[in-house]
Image: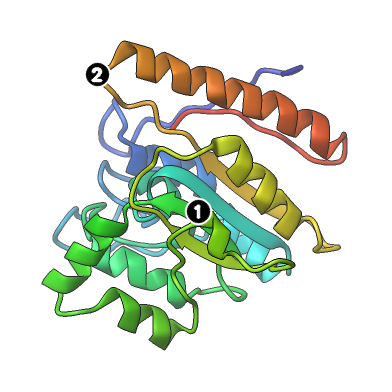
């Protein structure tokens, strides 16, 4: 990476941030409290909402760009959720998931690839909802594998059982779908390394490093590539 920049993602109330407040700061430019997803610091976690904060992904959608989210965490996890959802608690899985189908700007995230299918299904069931029914009502099938993505597709929602998938394959496939938009695209890629297994964590860092290098080489000088931590 030819340039290094510094940013402050401390929360509105604490020095140490979690993914929810940290990613909110990155994608909205405003600080909030730990556990809060893309809502202002007026939010009280688990009690009351703050003002909804507009994210960089939503600005991209508003302007007609293609958008994508890739994560080896659940698609409803704090980092990916902060790009498209609003919630006063990162644990509101069912509430967050349903916002995939009710975008505030544009037609919503075009390509989503991530894990968490069993946990999301369980959360929806607890809320007296069904994953397939929510998907059908929202007009977007929730695919189980990469192989289910139709050839030539420009939109896809893939929610896997596990986060152990090939990141390079996911990024390459997503870029092929997004690059067809003449206005450009915004893609957020998370490769979570939260683990007590040292070798696994290091392997994930190496994987991410290689994907960053290949992606930066592929996209050329007219695309901004940022690597950061939330």
Classify residue 39 as left or right of residue 149: left
Q: Which residue is mark 1?
A: 113
Q: Residue 107 at x, y = what percent? A: 60, 76
Considering depth in this image, is 31 or 158 the residue closer to the camera? 158
* Image location of residue 123, percent across then percent down: 19, 64
Indicate the quadrant containing the C terminus: top left, top right, bottom left or bottom right: top left
Identify the residue under disc 2.
Answer: 196
- Look at the image and tell me whether residue 92 can be seen: yes
Image: 214 above or below 180: above
For the question of whether residue 88 can be seen, the reply is no
Query: Toward which corner of the image does residue 85 lie, by quadrant?
Result: bottom left
Quick check: marks 1 and 2 in contact, CB under 8 Å? no
Is 185 placed left or right of 26 in the picture?
right
Outermost residue to the bottom: 137
Is tag 1's residue or tag 2's residue first in the polypeptide sequence? 1
Q: Secondary structure at mark 1?
A: strand
- Whether residue 158 sits left or right of residue 175 in the image: it is left
């Amino acid at each position: 990476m030819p340039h290094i920049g510094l940013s402050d993602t401390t929360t509105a109330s604490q020095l140490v941030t979690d993914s929810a407040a940290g990613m909110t700061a990155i994608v909205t430019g405003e600080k909030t409290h730990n556990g809060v997803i893309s809502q202002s610091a007026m939010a009280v976690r688990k009690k009351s909402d703050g003002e909804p904060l507009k994210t960089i992904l939503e600005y991209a959608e508003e302007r007609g760009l293609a958008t994508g989210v890739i994560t080896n965490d659940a698609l409803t996890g704090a980092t990916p959720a902060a790009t498209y959802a609003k919630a006063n608690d990162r644990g509101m899985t069912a509430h967050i998931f349903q916002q995939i189908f009710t975008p505030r700007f544009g037609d919503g995230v075009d390509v989503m690839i991530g894990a968490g299918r069993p946990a999301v299904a369980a959360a929806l069931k607890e809320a007296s909802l069904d994953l397939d029914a929510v998907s059908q009502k929202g007009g977007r099938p929730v695919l189980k594998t990469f192989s289910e993505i139709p050839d030539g597709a420009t939109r896809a929602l893939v929610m896997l059982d596990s986060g152990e998938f090939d990141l390079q394959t996911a990024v390459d496939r997503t870029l092929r779908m997004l690059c067809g938009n003449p206005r450009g695209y915004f893609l957020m890629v998370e490769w979570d390394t939260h683990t007590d297994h040292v070798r696994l964590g290091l392997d994930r860092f190496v994987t991410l490093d290689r994907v960053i290098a290949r992606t930066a080489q592929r996209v050329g000088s007219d695309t901004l590539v940022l690597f950061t931590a939330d």
